[in-house]
Image: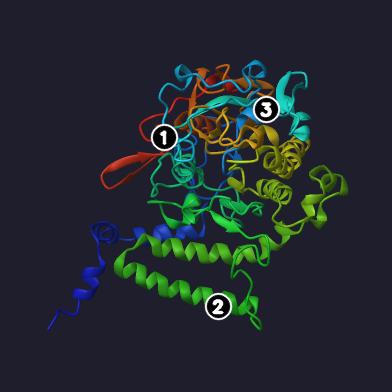
Amino acid sequence: MPHPLSDLQMLENRRQFFGRSTTGIGTIALASLLNGNLFAKEKSGATPRVGGLADIPHFAPKAKRVIYLLQSGAPSQVDLLDHKPSLEKLHMTELPDSIRNGQRLTGMTAGQKKFPIVKSPWKFRQCGKSGTWLSDLLPHMQTVADDICVINSVHTEAINHDPAITFFQSGHQQPGRPSIGAWLSYGLGSETENLPSFVVLLSKNSFNQAQPLYDRLWGSGFLSSKYQGVKFRSQGDPVLYLSDPAGGSDANRRVMLDRLAKLNQIREQEIGDPEITARIAQYEMAYRMQTSVPELADISTESESTLKMYGDDVKEPGSHAANCLLARRLAERGVRFIQVFHRGWDHHSNVQKNLPTLAKQTDQGSAALIADLKQRGMLDETLVIWGGEFGRTVYSQGNPQAFGRDHHPRCFSIWMAGGGIKPGMTYGKTDDYCYNVVENPMHVHDFHATILQCLGINHERLTYRFQGRDYRLTDVHGNVAKDILT
């Protein structure tokens, strides 16, 4: 007959054994989770925070938080941010083999025998005092040109959507690593006890062919689950099961959580699984969110001038404009990393029709977010990012008369603003064909290293030991783009 302790022994792993063998450490960890400031040692003059690592930030940060507007599907840099007057003369000519230089193609254009160059159908203009070139598809962004830094030299290895967006989210093309928001939650903690440190907002899907967005894109990987992003919904309760069931009361919920916490503490003392203490803390966070989230989601307190700035779409829950406003409200309340996903940019055909639709959906809300943060004195300490997972080809996919643009990882554009980024400048340069980077290349790892730099983090020192190796967001790569930093 099996020994009575055999079941318990099978539940233990090496990490849990050593965690349990240290007297009292589980109690200390639990107390820290329930009160993030209990053992916190803040550096002199630092903003009070919940959680995070004691030695981070490594140096004085320029940004306290990040709002990342991720445009899933890959916007066309040729038509939005990278002005190429040289394409006027090159229009409908064949892309030279010397420019393509054997680059691998997707299965969608690998069978094409011709690669006719197609100029942008839309005009670009120089905007603001900086003279930043922006497409007429972005009239609202043109008004904040002096506040943004356009980076035209981003590049990646990934040529298909899922590995490409996974790369941007986690620093690795294969799933399983922590997302960038999880890394920041782990390292920097939060500025509030009443909301998660990492929140995800999904804009409504406008195109049936939009790429799927999996929860792992904001997951915690091998970090504790308490660092994963919390997805807010645009309909019903922002977070599922946040409201008390019908007939329930706050007092009853408090009693239930206290008793559940005692049961979980007993279990944690038995097997030493750190995920149990994380789960207790998450229950407590959910309890506090019952009060903080309804107030957060109620935009009726915003002034008419603010709502007008974001446009008519702001009153439609789940629109990009509504999510941009909600992102600002989350930032005000101390959330560390807010990510807004907007899908539908995958335009393999009929760019003339589809691209203006997506640009209109995102232009005003994005520009309003920058202006709104600036007028509230928040832009200097909030890093705002806009961009997709790769770019689009300068040559036509399919019929040039109703042209599409295929995936292009060799060069594409993003913009950044606020939080330690030099405003009103353009960084990096592509060749006359908008096909290869020729000046100041920025790889995905460089992009991540630069974001961490703005937040006061040396990207080589934010690590987590897992399976015998010290992992980090930038893996073993990454150079900070110092020329774009204030």
Q: Could you tell whether 112 is left or right of 395 in the image?
A: left
Q: Mark 3 — residue?
A: 120
Residue at the far right in the pictured view: 304
Q: Quadrant of the N terminus?
A: bottom left
Residue labelled with disc 1: 474
- Label 2: few (<14), some or many (≥20) within 10 Å? few
Rounded to the nearest angstrom, the CA distance separating label 3 from label 2 is: 63 Å
Return the x and y of residue 214 as percentages of the image width and height.
50, 54
Q: Position of residue 243 (x, y in %)?
A: 64, 72
Coloring scheme used? rainbow
Which mark lies nearer to you, 1 or 3? 3
Disc 3 vs disc 2: which is toward the camera?
3
In this rendering, does residue 440 appear at all?
no
Give the amino acid at mark 1: Thr
Cβ–Cβ below 8 Å for labels 1 and 3?
Answer: no
Reading the image, the residue beneath label 2 is: 255
| Badge 1 density bin: few <14, some 14–19, many ≥20, Cα 10 Å | many
Q: Percent position (x, y) of residue 203?
A: 65, 52
